[in-house]
Amino acid sequence: MDWLSTLILFHLPWWVWVPVALIIVAAIVIPLVRLVGLKRALKIAAAAAAALGGLILIQRARQEGWRAREAKGERDAQSAIDKAERARRDAYDQFTARPDRLRDNDGHRRD
């Protein structure tokens, strides 16, 4: 179930939650109009819409943080790959830069 919550919370775009929130507010308003009248029902609906709007903004911030964390991980991985490639290239260039030292290293360590 963890994958499902991750999918819903972090991979479902925040703007998809807006129509869901509007449906929830409408589901609250319709019965309240019958119970407490239109004026009070609209006040309650405004409060519910504000609360749901705040939750949607929190969700949007969470998703932006998630994306930033993933981007940082990708940058760090690429940096490590680049560093390893540079080290390999430098080690190779160390022995190919001077033709008289080509036979100094045959790839085996002899300590």
Image (tube, grey):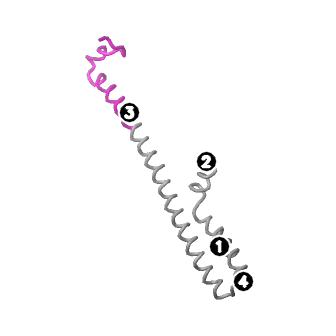
Q: Which mark is residue 22?
A: 1
| Disc nearest the viewer among 4 and 1 | 4
Amino acid at pointer 4: Leu
Residue that extends furthest to the top in the rendered view of this protein? 110
Identify the mark nearer the N-term, 2 or 1. 2
The location of residue 77, given as percent across then percent down, is 43, 40
Give x and y (percent) for residue 9. Answer: 58, 56
Pick the front one: 17 or 83: 17
Q: Which mark is residue 2?
A: 2
| Distance of label 2 from label 1 (alpha carbons) | 27 Å
Q: Which of the 4 quarters of the picture holds residue 101?
A: top left
- Mark-to-mark CA distance, 2 and 4: 39 Å
Residue 35, numbered circle: 4
Q: CA distance from mark 2 to mark 3?
A: 35 Å
Asked if the residue at tag 3 contacts the one at tag 4, i.e. Cβ–Cβ closer than 8 Å, the answer is no
Say whether disc 2 or disc 4 marks the residue closer to the N-terminus: 2
Secondary-structure class at tag 2: helix
Residue 47 placement (x, y as % from top left): 57, 78
Give whichever of discs 1 and 3 has the lower sequence position.
1
Please name the residue that numbered disc 3 is placed on. Answer: 84
- Residue at the far front: name it: 35
Q: Describe residue 31's horizontal placement relative to residue 102 as left or right.
A: right
* Residues tagged 1 and 3 counted as in contact (Cβ below 8 A): no
Task: Check disc 4 and report its element: helix, strand or loop.
Answer: helix
Task: Please provide the residue range marked out in magenta.
Answer: 82-111
2 vs 1, front mark: 2
Three-letter amino acid code of the residue under disc 2: Asp
| Residue at point 56%, 66% (across, down) | 56
Residue, x 42% and y 46% (percent of image)? 75
